[in-house]
Image (tube, rainbow, N blue to C red):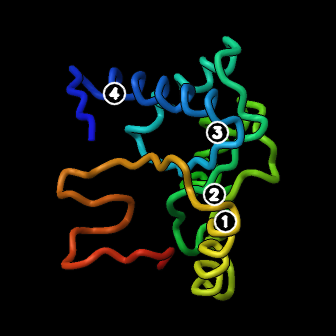
Amino acid sequence: MKIIIVKDSYQACQIASTMISEEINIKKDLVLGLATGETMIPMYDYLVEAYNNQSVDFSNVTTFNLDEYVGLEKNDQNSYDKYMHDHLFNHVNIQKKNIHLLNGTADDSNQVCRDYDTLIRSSNGIDLQILGIGNNGHIGFNEPANQLKLNTHI
């Protein structure tokens, strides 16, 4: 494990975006797990900038988002689907067929979770997962607990 200490979240996002770009340039068909939240916005801004500067090509990248709110339509201003399109997908050359987001309005959320896990496995797993860690140690919507759930879950 390599630990990099930086002066602020913007520098962390800049370094993270550079690392992501480097990984995509090494493996053109990288499977990338993505996170959302305020902290991630500068990282996506830097990735869009790298794309605009022709430093990275997203055309063969596949993405899986970490989470979504149950009950929100994908174009709701608070959905992570809208967030990802607003901050990254609408600004780079990623293929729509390679974007995977959870459906927050499905009738059977448990089936959505099972299907998502199957889709991740059929993509040979995630090569690089971006995560944010909250003040209390939570990752995504996974609050600190005695054990971690390994699969996609509600």
Count the marks: how many? 4
Q: Which callout, 3 or 4, points at the residue further toward the start of the chain?
A: 4
The mark found on residue 76 in the picture is 2
Q: Give me the C-alpha separation between circle 1 and circle 3.
A: 15 Å
Three-letter code, disc 4: Ala
Under circle 1, the secondary element is loop
Name the side, left or right, on which 16 lies relative to 83: left
Question: Residue at image x 49%, y 28%?
Answer: 17
Three-letter code, disc 1: Glu
Nearer mark to the viewer, of 4 and 1: 4
Nearer mark to the viewer, of 3 and 2: 3
Nearer mark to the viewer, of 4 and 2: 4
The mark found on residue 120 in the picture is none
Q: Residues within 10 Å of mark 2 (few under 14, many from 20)?
A: few
The mark found on residue 86 in the picture is 3
- Rendering coords of residue 36 (x, y %): 48, 48
Three-letter code, disc 2: Asp
Q: Do the residues labelled 3 and 2 touch (CB within 8 Å)?
A: no
The mark found on residue 73 in the picture is 1
Asked which quadrant contains residue 114, the reply is bottom right
Q: In this view, does 48 lie above or below 114?
A: above
- In-front residue for pair 20/7: 20
Q: Is residue 115 above or below residue 132?
A: below
Q: Do the residues labelled 1 and 2 touch (CB within 8 Å)?
A: yes
